[in-house]
Amino acid sequence: MDEFKGPGEKEKEEEAGDKAAAEEAGDGFQVVRGKKKKRPNGGSASGAGSGTMMAKDKAAAAAAAEPWTKAKVSFHDPNIPRPQDVYAIRVNNYNVPFDHVWLERTEDGSRPIHPLEKLPMEQFIDRNVPESEPVKPADLEDTPFTLVEDKNGLADLAKKLKSVNEFAVDLEHNQYRSFQGLTCLMQISTRTEDFVVDTLKLRIYIGLYLKEHFKDPTKRKVMHGADRDIMWLQRDFHIYVCNLFDTGQASRVLQMERNSLEHLLRHFCGVTANKEYQNADWRSRPLSDEMIKCLTYRPYLSFILV
C-alpha cells in the first residue's frame, strides 16, 4: 500500500521506526521497526543510562570498599584574594635565567660561585657511611607542631635547624591564574618537630633566615620528587640546596612497585596518607586544622631514608 501514501509520508514512517529502535519493551527485548529483538546483553537499560548507572555502581562499590576515603577538596577557591595584593608580593615574570643573589661572586664579579665549588671531591662524597638502625618517628599526635607566621618564629626555626644534621622539606605551590605561580607554604620536619612556614607572608625573609642551612653540605635535606621544589626554592627565595636525598628517585633506583610518597608511607611506615587536601588551594588563610594535619607527614621521610 506504499504507493498510495502521500509524498514524504514513507520517509516520516521510516524516521519514526528508527526512533522506535531505541525504545525498550521493558522485558529484556528491544523494539526494532515494530518487532521485538533480544538485546545482546539481555539487559533492558539504554546505552547512555546503562553507562551512567555502571559508573554510579562502581563509585558506590569503591566507597564501600574504602569507607575512609573522602572526596578531594576543590583546587581553586574563587573567593580568595590575590596574595600578590594582600602581601605586596612583587613577582618577577621576566623570561631570563634566575639570578642567585645570595651567592658569592668571583673576584672580578663576572659570575656567582656555586656552593659546591669550594668543596673538595673527597669531602663531598661520604664513602664511610655507618650502618644505623631505623628509628621510627613518634606518632603525629605526639609530635610538636609550630606554624611559623612571623620573623621571630622564623628565627627560632633557623636556630633549631642549626642543631640538627638532617631535615625533611616539602613545598605547596599554586599556579592558578599566575604566569609562574607562587610558593604558598614550606613544610620542614626534624626528627622531633614539625614546622609549617607561611611563605606568602614571610616571602622576603625566607632566604635571609634559612639559606645557610639549605646550602650547608653537612646537613642532609630529604625531599620527595624535588624537581620542581628545587626550582621554586631558587626562584622565590634564592635558596640553593646542597646534600639532597630524594626518596622518589631512590624508589626508582630500587625499582619499587610504585614511586609515590603515598606508597612509600604505607610500605615502610604503615601510614595511610590523607589525600583529601592534596589539590587544595593553599593560598587559603587561615589554614584549617584539616589542612595542617595533611601537611605533617614529612617526619616519616627521614625514616624512609634510613
Image (spheres, rainbow, N blue to C red):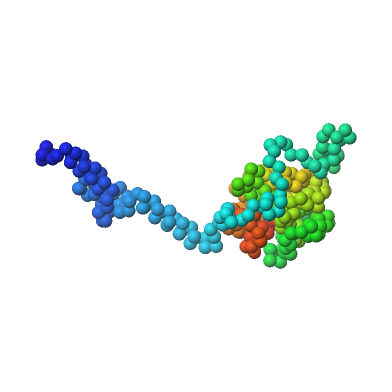
Q: Note whether 77 is above or below 228 in the view shown.
A: below
Q: Note whether 159 is above or below 207 in the view shown.
A: below
**Which residue does the image show at 36% across and 53% down from the upper left?**
49
Q: Quadrant of the N terminus?
A: top left
* Residue situated in front as seen by the camera: 247 or 102: 102
**Which residue does the image show at 63% across and 54% down from the upper left?**
81
Q: Position of residue 157 (x, y in %)?
A: 79, 58
From the viewer's perspective, is 174 left or right of 244?
left
Quarter of the image for residue 11 reads top left
Q: Residue furthest right?
A: 107
**Which residue does the image show at 65% across and 59% down from the upper left?**
285
From the viewer's perspective, is 57 left or right of 261?
left
Q: Position of residue 216 (x, y in %)?
A: 82, 47
Q: Position of residue 229 (x, y in %)?
A: 69, 46
Q: Note whether 238 is above or below 54 in the view shown.
A: above
* Residue situated in front as seen by the camera: 44 or 235: 235
Q: Position of residue 248 (x, y in %)?
A: 66, 47
Quarter of the image for residue 56 reads bottom left
Residue 64 appears in view:
yes
